[in-house]
Amino acid sequence: MRASQFHIATLKEAPADAEVVSHRLMLRAGMIKKLSAGIYTYMPMGLRVIQKVERIVREEMNRAGAIELTMPIVQPAELWQETGRFDKMGPELLRIRDRHQRDFVIQPTSEEVITDIARQDLRSYKQLPKNFYQIQTKFRDERRPRFGLMRGREFIMKDAYSFDRDAAGAQRSYQIMAQAYRRIFDRFGLRYRAVAADSGAIGGDLSEEFQVIAATGEDAIVYCPTSDYAANLEKAEALPPAGPRPAPTQPLTKTPTPGRSTCAEVAELLGVPLSRTVKSIVLATDEINERDEIVATRLWLLLLRGDHDMNEVKVGKLPGLELGFRFATEAEILEHFGCRPGYLGPVGLRRPVTVVADREVAVMADWICGANEVDHHYTGVNWGRDLPEPDRVADIRNVVAGDPSPDGKGMLAIERGIEVGHVFYLGTKYSRAMNATFLDEDGKPKPFEMGCYGIGITRLPAAAIEQNHDERGIIWPDAIAPFTVVICPIGMDRSAAVREAAERLHDELAAQGVDVILDDRGERPGAMFADWELIGVPHRVTLGERGLKDGLVEYQHRRDTQATPVPLANIVAWLR
Ligand code: ATP
Ligand code: MG
Ligand code: MG
Ligand code: MG
């Protein structure tokens, strides 16, 4: 490829609304262009990355025995009504109406359509197992589309669906996919972790997320460095099933607690056991994690209902707050964050209100916490798990780094991740709802045992950048780089020797199947290097007249701080 014949459109600055580094760099590198909130054009440079991601996914899905098809983006509402999801899915599901006033949806995922196909085509146990997949555009009307391709409204997902005779078969299909996912994510060349995820209503352990490790990730991963234990935060925190919420025995009351600020002091004053006062912090957010905001906001609403002085609920930003701190007293919190009293927490809060994160948080009645006023605490605080999804109190951070890991093999650690893949055992949820059956060996109809398996194709490049970048730009792993090698000739327009050597090298590498681009735009070296460092091509070869006189070119990996002279005669072998 010659740069003059490609479309290179880098920007000095990213628009101000691009908050995270991957979003900024993808815009600046000319990989994506915004059309509307959460809706992007994949520009030629970005499309090359996406296609490489797709190719790896396709190869490994095929290797694992999955069969590719493509289902429609626009799907009739009737199918979605069969499973009840037309109503249940809420505003994330984009509904449209055609000229005959018929309802349709834009697929956010495709369980209904694939189950409809299965009930038509898979009639006998002899045709099972089957696993169908597509790599196709999805639409989810996300509450907060943001971070560019990371959380788009329109995005590309690989979604696969397995059909089996029985639960044992479905679990085998699930394991085959879980293995294929490991191969896929190994090939991307990223640091990732497969973590147990909550399998919701289905129960059991057959749901795993594949999380790319990145400090800016929206998810938190709890793992044990000395064992195989790894789970996402919801799963790690999974609380006992919600029992009936205990009836409060006291009304919510603002009680004067003059001069008392620590839990122990308040407990003593009010004559209640210490376990009913607040012990550790869950409040506050780094403002990156939407879930934290939701949880903290909800807790505030719950805590402060009835408090008519509080007309604004806002979540405080605490620099340096990380998961896993456990504080015994409010004073410790203040000290840790170096705050004066009155700084912490939502607007109007004069004293840090810490919220209990004990494991029995699910059933909390008659607790005490700080009030929105100096020298006052609330008594009779109640909250529980009977909150609507997804604002579950189960999201409260009650897992703390340093706690013993559930497998007893070490201590827990916590890090942030980006969910790029998800494998899920579904059981017969969809097949029963849609009456999708096959005839088993005994001649009786049975519902399919299913699994579903997603990969965020367009989220993956964003996750890769969050993990691999520096102040100059992106650093792609070879496997998904838009080009693996860039040739930068210096003074190509003046020197026939440089032109000839650059073109010969380009042709030779291209002939060997190397994904190479020759920058023949005639840019000054500084601007040329800056462009390729921003775009993140991992390998660069620079040719200049002076070096060529000695038969030398310069090689520099995107992570190297210096170029290495390499004989022109050896450079092809060097790059391979
Ligand atoms: P999230 O928790 O980030 O909202 P999800 O759990 O809703 O994701 P799944 O239904 O499991 O997503 O979909 C499979 C994969 O599709 C996810 O693992 C993720 O990589 C990708 N994905 C989901 N939503 C988006 C989005 N809005 N933009 C880009 N990719 C997405
Ligand atoms: Mg989602
Ligand atoms: Mg998720
Ligand atoms: Mg998921």
Image (tube, rainbow, N blue to C red):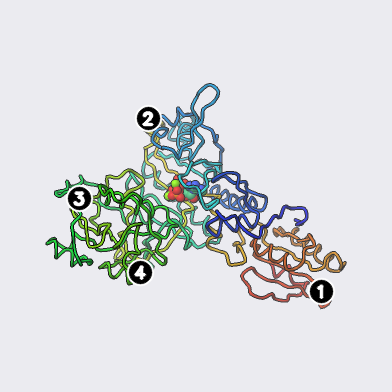
Instruction: Check disc 3 and report the residue beneath it.
Output: 252
Q: Which mark is residue 445?
A: 2
Q: Are marks 4 and 2 in contact (CB under 8 Å)?
A: no
Q: Which mark is residue 548?
A: 1
Label 4: state its secondary structure. loop
Ligand 1 neighbours mark 1 (CB distance < 8 Å): no
Does residue 410 appear in this view?
A: no
Is residue 556 shown left or right of residue 367? right
Instruction: Measure how far apart labels 1 and 3 are at the Cα level.
Output: 82 Å
Pinpoint residue 268: horizontal percent, then vertical percent: 14, 65
The three-letter amino acid code for the residue at tag 4 is: Cys
Label 3: state its secondary structure. loop
**Disc 1 packing (10 Å; few <14; some 14–19; many ≥20):** some
Pinpoint residue 462: horizontal percent, then vertical percent: 55, 55
Q: Nearer the viewer, mark 4 or mark 2?
A: 4
Q: Quick one: label 1 or label 2, which is nearer the N terminus?
A: 2
Is residue 419 shown left or right of residue 368? right
Pinpoint residue 130: horizontal percent, then vertical percent: 48, 40
Q: Nearer the viewer, mark 3 or mark 2?
A: 3
Q: Quick one: label 3 or label 4, which is nearer the N terminus?
A: 3
Instruction: Check disc 4 and report the residue beneath it.
Output: 339
Label 1: state its secondary structure. helix
Instruction: Measure how far apart labels 1 and 2 are at the Cα level.
Output: 75 Å
Instruction: Measure how far apart labels 4 and 1 are at the Cα level.
Output: 61 Å
Q: Is residue 237 above or below residue 145?
A: below
Ligand 1 neighbours mark 2 (CB distance < 8 Å): no
